[in-house]
Image: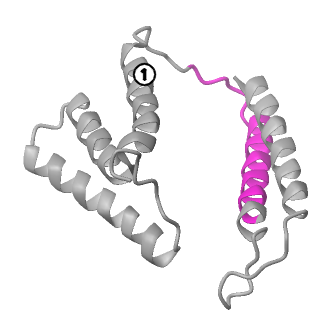
């Protein structure tokens, strides 16, 4: 496990350096009056990723004992979740972000056996509408409306 941590941290470190380098080639433009250009977020994420990969690399040398992780042989739940997510991605383009996200969250809550329908519907609606509102009104980024409602 420790060897895998070292390899994974080195790969993440290389990816973060590549992202940082590629983000320096972005056009210089400012977001409103904050002075943040298009390169700010990729650079910030790559610095965070590099820092975390460095911490993982160092921690892999500190521990002498290899911890044992027990994985379930039942991959059914993982495959169902991945399938839901793939259907969700396809549904965004057809029925739009808002309706697809509400349906996806309701489906995932049902799959995870959340019993309260009131809770399921309220969380699904509030989360979806909140994210849609932030992107459309604060970030001025239009989320997909889908080809059915276009």
Closer to us: 90 or 102: 90
Quadrant location of residue 24? bottom right
For image coordinates 78% across by 24% down, the residue present is 3
Report the quarter where the N terminus lies.
top right
Q: Most prominent secondary structure in the magenta stretch? A: helix
Residue 66: in magenta span: yes
Helix, strand or loop at label 1? It is helix
Residue 145 place in picture, x, y as percent: 40, 54
Residue 96 place in picture, x, y as percent: 38, 49
As drawn, 35 above or below 145: below
**Which residue is tagged 1?**
78
Quadrant location of residue 130? bottom left
Residue 38 place in picture, x, y as percent: 75, 70
Q: Residue furthest top?
A: 73
For image coordinates 68% across by 91% down, the residue present is 33
In screen coordinates, is 92 left or right of 140? Answer: left
Residue 132 place in picture, x, y as percent: 38, 63
Closer to us: 1 or 106: 106
As drawn, 147 above or below 141: above
Closer to us: 123 or 103: 103
Q: Dot 1 surroundings within 10 Å: few (below 14), some, or many (20 or more)?
A: few
For image coordinates 68% across by 88% down, the residue present is 34
* Colour scheme of the rendered structure: one colour
Quadrant location of residue 31? bottom right
Residue 72: in magenta span: no
In screen coordinates, is 23 left or right of 103? Answer: right
Closer to us: 4 or 16: 16
For image coordinates 78% across by 79% down, the residue present is 29
As drawn, 55 above or below 38: above
In screen coordinates, is 30 left or right of 110? Answer: right
As drawn, 146 above or below 114: below
Magenta stretch, residue numbers: 44-68
């Amino acid at each position: 496990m420790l060897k895998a941590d070292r390899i994974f941290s080195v790969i993440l470190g290389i990816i973060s350096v590549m992202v940082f380098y590629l983000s320096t080639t972005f056009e210089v433009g400012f977001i409103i009056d904050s002075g943040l250009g298009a390169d700010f977020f990729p650079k910030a994420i790559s610095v965070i990723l590099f820092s975390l990969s460095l911490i993982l690399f160092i921690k892999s040398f500190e521990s002498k004992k290899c911890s044992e992780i027990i994985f379930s042989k039942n991959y059914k739940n993982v495959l169902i979740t991945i399938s839901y997510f793939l259907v969700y991605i396809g549904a965004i383009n057809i029925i739009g972000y808002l309706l697809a996200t509400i349906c996806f969250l309701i489906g995932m809550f049902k799959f995870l056996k959340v019993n309260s329908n009131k809770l399921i519907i309220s969380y699904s609606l509030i989360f979806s509408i909140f994210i849609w509102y932030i992107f459309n009104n604060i970030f001025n980024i239009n989320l997909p409306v889908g080809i059915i409602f276009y």
